[in-house]
Image: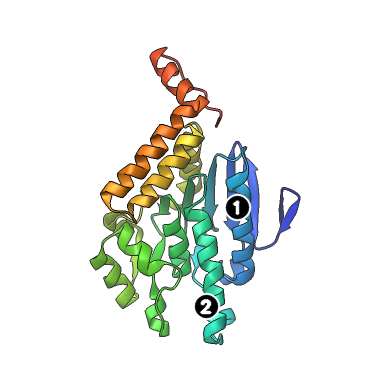
């Protein structure tokens, strides 16, 4: 069990170090399968990290065997339609807490990332994947289909034809394929995944947090807005940053040929 901000967590290992907030899914006997208790804890942690000024970047990971191997079938197999919908409410709530988080989120993926695990990965901003990872959306083989955002995020990350192929067939695919179709930012040896995630997190933590937050929101908006509406939203967010100390610091540091020191103000 782990503690963060005075709260004990059981299904997530939660700790902060050097401005990086970690959330490690912690159901190893179930390959980190997603159940309601894990979703509740992860949702709470994501919101705490989002509002914590000391946290600059978030790394979400599993263990060496699994990032997450989908929904916990033992928990959901006998749901009635309303229970199934309530379960997905918690999944969506949690994944949007990742996707809309004020901080950049990095998925450090080793082992299995299947079903809801892949959907969680796709909700993150940066995907660092082990060479030996196995990914997929196999729900079609269970008489259902991806219900945690997979039908929406997969075509946005890859293409509509790639999304249909892997959602319709349920086929697993490897890290090289994930990179080829646009699901991975980088593919590295398994023993380097966490270090590369930390390296990326440290790089992002040195950027202006206000600018990162607004840039993330604008990029996310681009998936849902026409280009003119998206550009107007971008214009407002960009202009708003000129009221910040970070903008003054960043531009003055450039003009003075020194390193900027951003404070998130």
**Residue 125, how many percent across, how many down?**
43, 50
**Residue 64, how many percent across, how many down?**
52, 58
Which residue is label 2 attached to?
85
Q: Is residue 127 left or right of residue 103?
A: left
Above or below 253: residue 182: below
Q: Secondary structure at mark 2?
A: helix
Quadrant the C terminus occupies: top right
Report the front residue among 46 and 28: 46
Which residue is label 1 attached to?
47
- Look at the image and tell me whether residue 131 can be seen: yes
Q: How is the image coloured?
A: rainbow
- CA distance for labels 1 and 2: 22 Å
Q: Secondary structure at mark 1?
A: helix
- Look at the image and tell me whether residue 27 can be seen: no
Q: Label 2: how many residues lie within 10 Å, few (<14), some (14-19) or many (20+)?
A: few
**Residue 124, how many percent across, how many down?**
45, 53
Please tell me which residue is depicted at 51% across the width and 41% down the height of the picture: 198
Farthest left residue? 161
Please tell me which residue is depicted at 30% across the width and 77% down the height of the picture: 169
Q: Label 1: how many residues lie within 10 Å, few (<14), some (14-19) or many (20+)?
A: some
Quadrant the N terminus occupies: bottom right
Above or below 92: residue 246: above
Above or below 161: residue 245: above
Q: Quadrant of residue 77?
A: bottom right
Q: Is residue 235 left or right of residue 106?
A: left
Above or below 154: residue 167: below
Q: Earlier in the sequence, mark 1 or mark 2?
A: 1
């Amino acid at each position: 069990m782990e503690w963060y901000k005075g709260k004990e967590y059981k299904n997530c290992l939660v700790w902060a170090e050097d401005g990086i907030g970690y959330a490690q899914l912690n159901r190893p006997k179930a390959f980190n399968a997603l159940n309601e208790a894990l979703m509740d804890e992860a949702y709470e942690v994501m919101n705490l990290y989002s509002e914590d000024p000391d946290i600059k970047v978030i790394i979400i990971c599993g263990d060496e065997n699994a990032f997450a191997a989908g929904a916990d079938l033992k928990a959901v197999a006998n749901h009635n339609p309303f229970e199934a919908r309530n379960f997905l409410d918690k999944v969506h709530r949690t994944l949007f807490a990742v996707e809309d988080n004020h901080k950049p989120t990095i998925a450090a993926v080793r082992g299995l990332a299947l079903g809801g695990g892949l959907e969680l990965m796709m909700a993150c901003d940066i995907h660092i994947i082990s060479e030996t990872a196995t990914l997929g959306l196999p729900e079609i083989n269970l008489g259902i289909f991806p219900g945690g955002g997979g039908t929406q995020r997969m075509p946005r990350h890859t293409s509509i034809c790639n999304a249909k192929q892997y959602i319709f067939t349920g086929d697993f695919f490897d890290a090289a394929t994930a990179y080829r179709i646009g699901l991975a930012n980088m593919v590295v040896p398994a023993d380097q995944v966490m270090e590369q995630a930390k390296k990326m997190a440290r790089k992002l933590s040195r950027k202006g947090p206000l600018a990162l937050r607004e840039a993330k929101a604008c990029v996310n908006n681009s998936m849902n807005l026409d280009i003119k509406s998206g550009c107007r939203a971008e214009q407002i967010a960009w202009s708003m940053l000129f009221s910040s100390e970070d903008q003054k610091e960043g531009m003055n540091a450039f003009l003075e040929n020194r390193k900027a020191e951003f404070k998130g103000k």
